[in-house]
Each structure stands twice: as C-alpha cells, then as structure tokens.
Amino acid sequence: DPNPERRLGLRFPDGFRWGAATSAYQIEGAAKEDGRGASVWDTFSHTPGRTRNGDTGDVAADHYHRWANDLDLMKDLGLRSYRFSISWPRVQADGTGKANQRGLDFYRRLVDGLHERGIEPMATLFHWDLPQALQDLGGWENRDVAYRFADYAAAVFEALGTAVPVWLTINEPKTVVQNGYLGGHHAPGLRDPDAAYLVAHHLQLAHGLAVRALRAESDARIGPALNLHPCYPADDRPETETATRLYDGYENRLYLDSILRGAYPQDVLDDLGPDSRMVRGIRDGDLAVISSPVDLLAVQYYTPYYVTGGGDTETRWPTSEAFWQQIFPDGMFDMLTRITRDYGPIPLTITENGLPCPDELGSDGTVDDPGRVEFLRDHFAAAHRAIEAGVPLESYHVWSLMDNFEWAEGYEQRWGLVYVDYPTQRRILKRSAHWYKGVIRDNTV
Ligand code: PNW
C-alpha cells in the first residue's frame, strides 16, 4: 500500500481500550537486582548456541531502571491499557517461600505510576520466566509446580490484587509446550513429546488454581492468555479435512475446551493415547479446577495455519521477518467470531498482535516502518469487523510497546512501536507509533 496511513473511517465503540504489551524478561534487564533469582530463560540464554548472537535478557531495554520514562512514553501515545508481566523470580527467587518485598515494590511503583497517568494496568502472572530452582525439581513436568504457582499468585494478589483490575494467568501455554518441549528452541530446550503434553496439563491446572486464588483475595477480573491459530485445510480432500480438525485440536481446543467447557477434546486425548503421560496425569477434579469460571479470554493472534493431508503446514501468504508468521488479517476475524460462536459471549481482549520489521534508525533520527502501519491498520479493521459481527471485544494490545529481547531471536528482530537504541537505551517513536497515537486519539482507524 503506497499510503498505509490513509484512514479507513472505522470508528470503535466508546470505551474501547487501546493498549500495548510487553513481558518482564524481554524488557526489564536488571537480572540480578533487588534479590531476583535466576529463571529458566537466564539459564537458557546463557547457554552457548541457544540464542542468536548469544543475546541474553541481562540488560534488555533496561526498563527496570527506566520505567518512569517508559510510562511517560505510554502517556504520550495515549494508551488506555498497558499489559506487562510480573517476574516470578523477582517475587520468589527460588519459586517458593516468603515473597521478596523489593521485587513486589517494583511492580507497585509501576502500577501506581500507570494509575497516575490514567492508564489501566493488565498484569500477566507468568510469561515463561520459571524460577530455575523449580526447573531443577522437574519444572512443569512436576505437578507440584502448579501448586507453587498458585502460592506465588496468591502472594502477588495479596500485594497488588486490588490495584490491578485485570489479571492474566499464563501467557501462551501452547508456546511453552511447543517451543520449550517439542521444538526445543525455547527454554527449557527439551524435545520430548510425551513430557510436552503433561506440561500442557500442568500449565492448565496452574491456570485454574490461580483463578481460584484470586477469588479469595480480590474482585478483579481474571482470564487466560492464549495464542490461537485459525487452521484451514490446504485443499478440499477428505483426509485434509480430518488432519486439519486434529491440528485445530492441538492448537486451539486443547486449551479453549478445557478452560471454557471443562473437558479436553476427545480427538486429542485419543490421539495422545491412554498410556501418554498427559492422559495418565489427569486426576479426578482437575478439569473442575481448570474450568473455574473466568471473566474474560485474552487472545493473541499472529498467523493462520494451512494444514495438508499429511498433517504438515504450508505457506500461502507473505511472511514477516518471523519465519512462522504469515500475514493474514482475516484470520483474526475468523478466530474472534469462532470463539464467540463456539464458546458464547465471553468478553474478549486482544493481548498481542504485531510483527517484526527491518527497522533502522535513519540519519535524520526517525524510524520509518510503513509495513507495521499497514499490518496494524488491516488487523484493526478485522477486529472492527468482528465487533460489528457481535464479538464482545473490549481492548487491543499491540505487541510490542518497544523493541525487546525476542527470545531465541535475541535483539535482531524488532517488534516495537518504539525503537530502542540499545547502546544508549534511547527510545524513539517509530512512524507506526505516531500513526497509532492518532488512531487512539480519534478511536478510529
Ligand atoms: C508471543 N507462533 O510468542 C509471545 O507471547 C511474546 O513474548 C513474543 O515476543 C511474541 O509472541 C512474538 O514472537 C509467540 O509460532 C511465539 O505463532 C510463537 C508464535 C506466536 C507467538
């Protein structure tokens, strides 16, 4: 599009909350300050060969020290909501025991600073930074870690529960399962399918236990944060239809059905088999915990999948710099409307959507990212269409507020609305950030 900033004239409902998202390990740095313990991502990123250029989150965007300046940036953008995550090893260095007050104080300052600037905090309890001490006990393969998570959640709710109106439990359990335990390119770096789905069950259990812990502490709202992928058959052969259905089971229904219907999808359980560690690990009462009523569902949408008869995927649309991402805004419409159709009118929020662009700091001090403007405009339009179709979508958080540590890809991929010049830690609003500011001001794309 030669002019991606051209407005489409789509007005969002009054009160719609525009936002941006980050996560603790990706932006905070200060890896050893104020009593923070090591997480699996410290271990993983410090293991040679695991991340691009050996990058780590030791310093990242130094948000731990620059948080006040970053909050001013958010206010300048006009954000109504900011989604961040709380680092478990800052709150409990070893993942158990008494909460570390200095760790909690950082998030208290952040939350108070958001309120002072009129921005609603949305906090994720777990965005992949499991305390290493718990990994040493087996990590999410160990059922006890789900109970440790509930204790951690209770400590956080006690400290911040009433100041944060919206809580999210676990960021993208599926990515932990698939990248951490199947592909092995995320921490803890294992390739063990049988372990992977037991981990999925324990992550779901941990989610439900945290929901119950919140109810005891505060009347804030809470829900899961799921990355969902619309799955389309690559052709119209019957075997492709069948393969696509099972693929959808592993990508979407495994998480959605257990939380919103109180049962794992039977086709996935059958495919795993009765002898799988997951199926053997499900105990009486677990599904009741997992399906504890939630107040909203947070959806993270990046890409569709086109599934072949052999159960592989193929690429149909232009990809971004992320090898796994095809740019297909209609996929967001399809996923949002499908959730409302299949699971009822539960309030929805988009908690992540974005792409990496080849952003460079120009000699005139600006950063031009027309591809991001076009991508966001088209996805915002898809969200608008979903709202018109009756989807109760209440907010939208762009991934990400600023450039950050993109996990195994290190700092090479830039996902931010705000450019981070790492050597100086200077922040520069990209062209997309200036454009987004106008969208927020007018509540119109
Ligand atoms: C999310 N996929 O991960 C995470 O929540 C963020 O921390 C991350 O920085 C962001 O998306 C960009 O990668 C994903 O394969 C990882 O479709 C993989 C996929 C989607 C999201």
Image: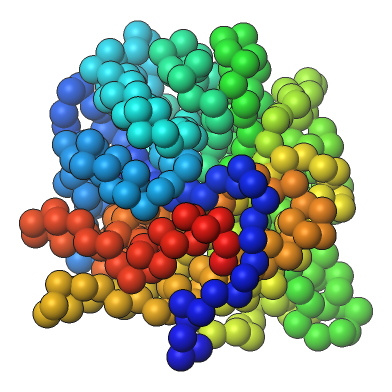
Q: Is residue 307 left or right of residue 123?
A: right
Residue drawn where x is 54% and y is 26% of the image: 165
Which residue is painted at 87% across and 53% down in the image?
Answer: 341
Tally the numbered discs: 0
Q: Is residue 247 something one can see in this rendering?
A: no
Front in this rendered view, residue 323 or 436: 436
Task: Place residue 281 in its image quadrant.
Answer: top right
Q: Residue furthest right?
A: 238
Residue 361 lies in quadrant: bottom left
Residue 212 in view = yes
Residue 280 x/y as whole percent = 73, 34
Q: Quadrant of the C terminus?
A: bottom right
Residue drawn where x is 40% and y is 48% of the image: 78
Q: In the image, residue 85 lies at what x, y percent? A: 41, 37
157 to the left or right of 365: right
Above or below for 204 versus 229: above
Nearer the observer, 182 or 26: 26
Q: Residue 397 location, x and y as percent?
A: 51, 51
Is 230 in front, or is 339? 339
Residue shown at 34% from the left, 46% from the top: 74
Measured along the vertical axis of the image, is residue 77 above or below residue 232?
A: above
Is 54 on the left or on the right of 414, as rendered? left
**Quick one: which residue is furthest to the bottom in this view?**
2
Q: How is the image coloured?
A: rainbow
